[in-house]
Image: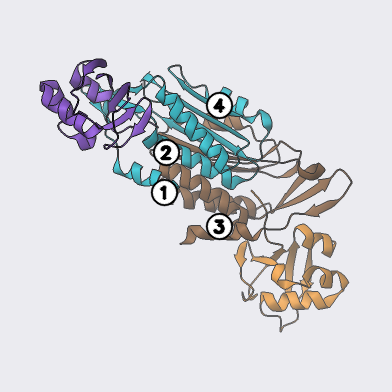
Chain colours: A brown, B cyan, C orange, D purple
Amino acid sequence: MIRVAVQPAAIDVGAEFDLHDAGGHGASASFIGRVRGDGDLTELFLEHHPAMTEAGLGDLAHAAADRWQLAALTLIHRVGAMAPGDTIVLVLASSPHRSGALAACEFLIDRLKTDVMLWKRETFADGRVAWVEARAGDEVRAERWNQ
Amino acid sequence: MIRVAVQPAAIDVGAEFDLHDAGGHGASASFIGRVRGDGDLTELFLEHHPAMTEAGLGDLAHAAADRWQLAALTLIHRVGAMAPGDTIVLVLASSPHRSGALAACEFLIDRLKTDVMLWKRETFADGRVAWVEARAGDEVRAERWNQ
Amino acid sequence: MALNLAYFAWVRDRMGVADEVVELPADIADLTALLTWLAGRDERGALAFAEPQRIRAAIDGVMMGPGAPLADAREVALFPPVTGG
Amino acid sequence: MALNLAYFAWVRDRMGVADEVVELPADIADLTALLTWLAGRDERGALAFAEPQRIRAAIDGVMMGPGAPLADAREVALFPPVTGG
């Protein structure tokens, strides 16, 4: 089962785990990314492209499911306005053995930082607003998976 | 917060996530291992050493927390008799950024398969009982972390 | 040639609009030429596209490199490197 | 020298007991010698320790290699390679 979603609503991590785990897979790896409140951040806004963002996540999900023969995969990205502590992204990958689940999880979080149309904008307590700059290290991590 | 447990009781994954996530960490990675029902397996029994198993898990947990500067770590291994679908092991690692959480999670699951005093015994529908043999690949995966 | 342009993140902020339809001169054949043309067209274009190496593009929903031809393109999306996850 | 031995997994199955106290001959100085002595002592020992390369050991709670000396040891745990996780 592959489940991909781009949603403005809060990600219900517990419900997603339950849905994903219905198969009782041998090994499940997850990654959860949350909004950090560093430097008096008050809002994180995630901009997306209505069609291309979901298509990009879907492409990554299918690539991972094929490469590691996954039994189940959940890939959910929140968009719009979020507060510190909110879950931005949830990756859940399951396979009979641990290596595939762990590798797929890491691949997905690395690649969605460089391949999917999403942009972060930060608003701080003093009113300052800034678009987050892409990090060179993210490109390096994402590139590893092509080797 | 480091939480390590060796327990005969079922692992309550949702409750452990809630406990672990109380800090609202930037990045959380998890690994869940479950009993697979391959080949008509009816019971998986995990034998442990009362003192050394928990000490071994504790040593690994502290090594990971130090190496990746983790904000929180949960490492729970079930022992005794289990049925297909039951959770054997739960690893939860959190850090401000994704790389530490993901690496710690993988390190812990790799190393606990070679460094911690636990032994699996399988019982099948036809009454056959067999101790699981250690796999050479597990040694190779565990050894990577010393490089 | 009429072309739909869509802008995202700070490219949209600097252009002041989320999308527009432009009438492209016949000699603008690829993405690099399009960015140069937009940067020279007006002040907001100069602000948004002064550093073309910081711009990424998709043609009709597919990510493309700077040399990609515009022939038959219906929509070009222009945006900074992505920062999701 | 009196020494506590503890067995786990199939080592325990083959030895028929989970632990025992043995009176060790004076010339049994390290783990390798202990395994050879146990394998030669009786039939269950021969069954459990015929392949010493398949045995792992801990002395007083610390994992040790085959050359580890037994001097001052109170308990030696003998077991197959672990298979948790």
Marks 3 and 4, how far apart at CA: 32 Å
Chain where mark 2 sits: B
Marks 2 and 1, how far apart at CA: 10 Å
Secondary structure of residue under mark 4: strand
Residue tagged 3 = A142
Vertical order, D4 against D68 (above or below)? above
Foreground pick, D54 / A22 = D54
Q: Amino acid at mark 1?
A: Arg
Instruction: Give the quadrant of the N terminus of chain B.
Output: top right
Q: Is residue D10 visible?
A: yes
Vertical order, A133 against B86 (above or below)? below
- What residue occupies the far front of the structure in this picture? D26
Residue tagged 2 = B111
Q: Is residue A20 visible?
A: no
- Sort mark 2 into few (<14), some (14-19) or many (20+) by Cα contacts within 10 Å: many
Confirm whether circles 4 and 1 share one chain. Answer: yes
Q: Nearer the viewer, mark 3 or mark 4?
A: 4
Whichever of callouts 2 and 4 sits on the residue coming sooner in the sequence is 4
Whichever of callouts 4 and 1 sits on the residue coming sooner in the sequence is 4
Question: Residue D56 at x, y = what percent?
Answer: 28, 32
Chain where mark 3 sits: A
Q: Quadrant of residue A82?
A: top right
Residue tagged 1 = B144
Secondary structure of residue under mark 1: helix
- What residue occupies the far bottom of the structure in this picture? C27
- Sort mark 3 into few (<14), some (14-19) or many (20+) by Cα contacts within 10 Å: some
Q: Nearer the viewer, mark 3 or mark 1?
A: 1
